[in-house]
Amino acid sequence: MKTVLLIEDNTDIRENTSELLELEGFKVLVADNGGTGLILTKQSKPHIILCDIMMAGINGYEVFAELKTDPVTSGIPLIFLSASVERKAVDSGLAMGAKGYIQKPFDPQELFDAIINCFKAT
């Protein structure tokens, strides 16, 4: 069973996405902010991370940058989730090395396809 860490500060999105992933057979860990997400990543070493970008405190870009500096977490694929439709936000995330960028609200199949593609690439 693959483990997905979902870092999302919006309660509704976090709960709905977590439930969708569990129904697809993933083990899901959740964090409601970037700081908790970093701690959970280092403790549990998930197979993939889904991370919101715009969060109070440590944002998604900062989470990803921190993970990339640690040899233990640097190889974990990360997909950004964001409500932003600006091309600059998409390009920034992908330029950092993110494996994907999904715009909220998203279709569940789009999410599953992105996760599966990450697993195929590793």
Image (cartoon, rainbow, N blue to C red):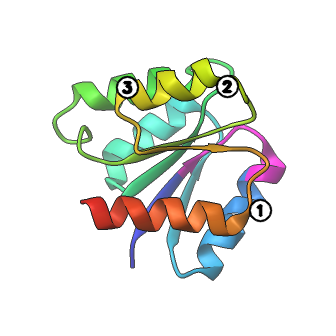
State the residue at coordinates (34%, 65%): 119
Q: Which residue is mark 3?
A: 96
The label on residue 16 is 1
Vertical comparison of 78 with 110: above or below:
above
Report the amino acid beneath label 3: Met
State the residue at coordinates (39%, 72%): 2
Residue 69: x and y in percent read 24, 24
Q: Which of the two marks, 3 or 2, is nearer to us in this view?
A: 3
Q: Quadrant of the N terminus?
A: bottom left
Q: Which residue is mark 2?
A: 54
Report the amino acid beneath label 1: Asn
Q: Secondary structure at mark 3?
A: helix
Few, some or many residues within 10 Å of mark 1 (<14, 14–19, 20+): few
Q: Which residues are magenta?
A: 6-13
Residue 20: x and y in percent read 69, 71
Residue 26: x and y in percent read 50, 74
Residue situated in front as seen by the camera: 97 or 33? 97
Q: Secondary structure at mark 2?
A: loop
Residue 101: x and y in percent read 55, 41
Do the residues under discs 3 and 2 have CB atoms within 8 angstroms?
no
